Image (cartoon, coloured by chain):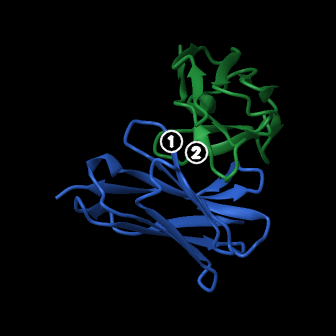
Amino acid sequence: QLQLQESGPGLVKPSETLSLTCTVSGGSISSSSYYWGWIRQPPGKGLEWIGSIYYSGSTYYNPSLKSRVTISVDTSKNQFSLKLSSVTAADTAVYYCALIAAAGHFDYWGQGTLVTVSS
Amino acid sequence: EIVMTQSPATLSVSPGERATLSCRASQSVSSNLAWYQQKPGQAPRLLIYGASTRATGIPARFSGSGSGTEFTLTISSLQSEDFAVYYCQQYNNWPPGGTFGQGTKVEIK
């Protein structure tokens, strides 16, 4: 059974870079049938798509975050990663990684990890 | 950017009753529309994709309909485990991702 697990620091200082990794188990990140993505959810608020990546390395970002986001993939480790630079308190959220079907809907989600931006 | 608007924000329903949730797109998304269920402290779960196709393991009491700009999620007979927040998401415009509605909370009446 496919599982996704987010990992990374739970606390990041303002102006620094948030870094998270998603480890995929029970399936190959190199599958040509899927994309992989990041979504976030500020406390008590709705969902926001951050960006997506294909195993080949092609990336797609939310235009509102594009200038600060980098998503990369490491097929040897079956992982993909998120970097969000110059964070502020507004970036405090639960960050989810997900498998995206070729059509574009989010098929499977990780459990999520809370990242707080605070000094 | 395509904006997704869900209504109502909160829906109060008694167990066993029918719940009807709406999602409207600011421009046509064809049938590229998904519904997700989120319970407190949990990740969202895919319910419906392609506007009307139930995801694996989703009970038949959940059904989706619509195309273009107007979509509906219907829960035919609410069970206790169905009280949650429901989000719609459009994925019509490549790249893979898309925008979410703000959610509808289904609460016990």
> Could you tell me how far apart the alpha carbons at marks 1 and 2 are, in whole angstroms?
9 Å
How packed mark 2 is, by other alpha carbons closer than 10 Å (few <14, some 14-19, many 20 or more), is: many
Res. A47 mark? 1
x then y, percent, for residue A114: 38, 55
Chain letter of disc 1 in the image: A
x then y, percent, for residue B26: 63, 25
Mark 1 residue type: Leu
Q: Which residue is drawn at 53% across and 21% down?
A: B107
Q: Is residue B16 visible?
A: no
Mark 2 residue type: Pro
Res. B10 mark? none
Q: What element carries label 2?
A: loop
Quadrant of the snapshot with the N terminus of chain B: top right
x then y, percent, for residue B81: 61, 33
What residue is disc 2 on? Answer: B44
Q: Is mark 1 on a helix, strand or loop?
A: loop
x then y, percent, for residue A101: 74, 55
Tag 1 and tag 2, C-beta contact below 8 Å: yes
- Chain B: give its colour: green
Q: Which of marks 1 and 2 is in front?
A: 1
Rendering quarter of residue A54: bottom right
- Chain A: give its colour: blue
Pick out the residue farthest to the bottom.
Answer: A76
Chain letter of disc 2 in the image: B
Q: Which residue is drawn at 27% across and 55% down?
A: A117
